[in-house]
């Protein structure tokens, strides 16, 4: 199924996984509203809402750049209203915006704690809440959170309690909202990568070029997201998807296109349950945690 003519409201998306998803959906002819804070170039974080909009249009879609800080209710409300005014409605909400701080309890200030929870958990809840009235009017309504499976093991919490709580909060939104809005035909799912993904976060926080070379390209998440968003929302809800498994279901067998040239072993991502690795034919180094 094509996403041609569908309208996507995405938090974040000026770079990395979000931008890759936006470009992939735009290739179908979808409209994408990018609601993010990045309006000026940053040498550490390339890409702004304006460069993202240009790439979306170049890929074949409609684009709307929305300067929006999802910590603030009024800004989200205004951004959603502008997207509806521009495109006539909203069919898909993608909660992609995220804040990360990988530190233990004593090394995490309450300012950092609040930032992660305001953007990850509260931001996801808020953006979903404000788009839901419009999703209810769509014939193809999806919410997709870029968040992990709820694998409630101490090993995921101990190194960075605050970050894990904030990311799992996004996934708890999936667990609850999928059932709450099942009767409305609105799909609510999560998507998470099997391996590390080569993004600014990996290069700046998780080992730089070394780990980046052991990571897959964001396009694997984009293709997996597109596959999920193309499915019948009434038959596909409440799932915690892993990118590679989604694509294997779609018939993909060659994943080399998603790796960097000359890449050897791949690095596993955070939060992936042991049973996923056990059933995957892909060999990864399970070092991140």
Image (cartoon, helix red, strand yellow):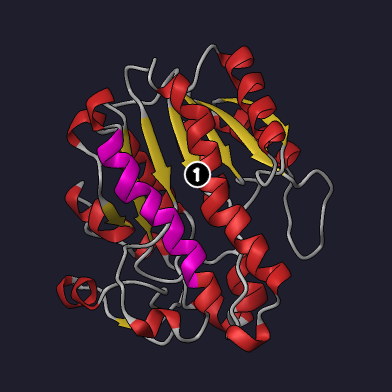
- Which residue is labeled 1 in the image? 125
In this image, 159 relative to 239: left or right? right
- Give yes or no for residue 24 being in the magenta stretch: no
Near-viewer residue (182 or 271): 182
- Give yes or no for residue 172 being in the magenta stretch: yes
- Asked whether residue 232 is in view, the answer is no
Residue 44 on image: x %, y % = 77, 65
Residue plotted at (45% across, 54% down): 170
- Measured along the vertical axis of the image, is residue 245 above or below residue 71? below
In this image, 106 relative to 23: left or right? right
Residue 273 on image: x %, y % = 27, 73
Q: What residue occupies the far front of the structure in this picture?
A: 110
- Total marks drawn? 1
Quarter of the image for the N terminus: give it: top left
Residue 114 on image: x %, y % = 66, 63
Question: Magenta region, mostly helix, strand or loop?
Answer: helix
- Asked whether residue 66 is in view, the answer is yes
Near-viewer residue (121 or 49): 121
Question: Which residues are drawn in magenta?
Answer: 164-180
């Amino acid at each position: 199924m094509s996403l041609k003519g569908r309208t996507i409201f995405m938090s974040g998306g000026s770079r990395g996984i979000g931008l890759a998803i936006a470009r992939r959906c735009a290739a179908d002819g979808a409209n994408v509203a990018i609601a993010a804070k990045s309006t000026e170039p940053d040498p550490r974080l390339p890409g702004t809402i304006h460069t993202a909009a240009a790439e979306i249009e170049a890929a074949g879609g409609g684009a709307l750049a929305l300067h929006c800080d999802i910590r603030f209710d009024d800004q989200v409300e205004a951004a959603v209203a502008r997207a509806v005014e521009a495109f006539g409605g909203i069919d898909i909400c993608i909660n992609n915006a995220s804040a990360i701080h990988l530190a233990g309890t004593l090394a995490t200030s309450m300012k950092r704690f609040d930032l992660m929870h305001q953007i990850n958990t509260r931001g996801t809840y808020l953006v979903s809440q404000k788009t839901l009235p419009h999703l209810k009017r769509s014939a193809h309504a999806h919410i997709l959170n870029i968040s992990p499976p709820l694998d409630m093991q101490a090993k995921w919490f101990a190194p960075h309690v605050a970050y894990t709580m904030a990311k799992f909060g996004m996934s708890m939104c999936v667990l609850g909202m999928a059932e709450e809005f099942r009767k409305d035909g609105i799909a609510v799912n999560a998507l998470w990568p099997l391996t590390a993904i080569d993004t600014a976060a990996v290069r700046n926080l998780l080992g730089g070029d070394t780990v980046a070379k052991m990571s897959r390209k964001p396009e694997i998440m984009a293709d997996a997201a597109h596959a999920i968003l193309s499915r019948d929302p009434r038959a596909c809800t409440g799932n915690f998807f892993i990118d590679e498994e989604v694509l294997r279901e779609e018939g993909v067998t060659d994943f080399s296109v998603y790796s960097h040239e000359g890449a050897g072993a791949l690095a596993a991502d955070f939060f992936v349950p042991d049973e996923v690795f056990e059933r995957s034919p892909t060999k990864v180094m399970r070092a991140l945690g």
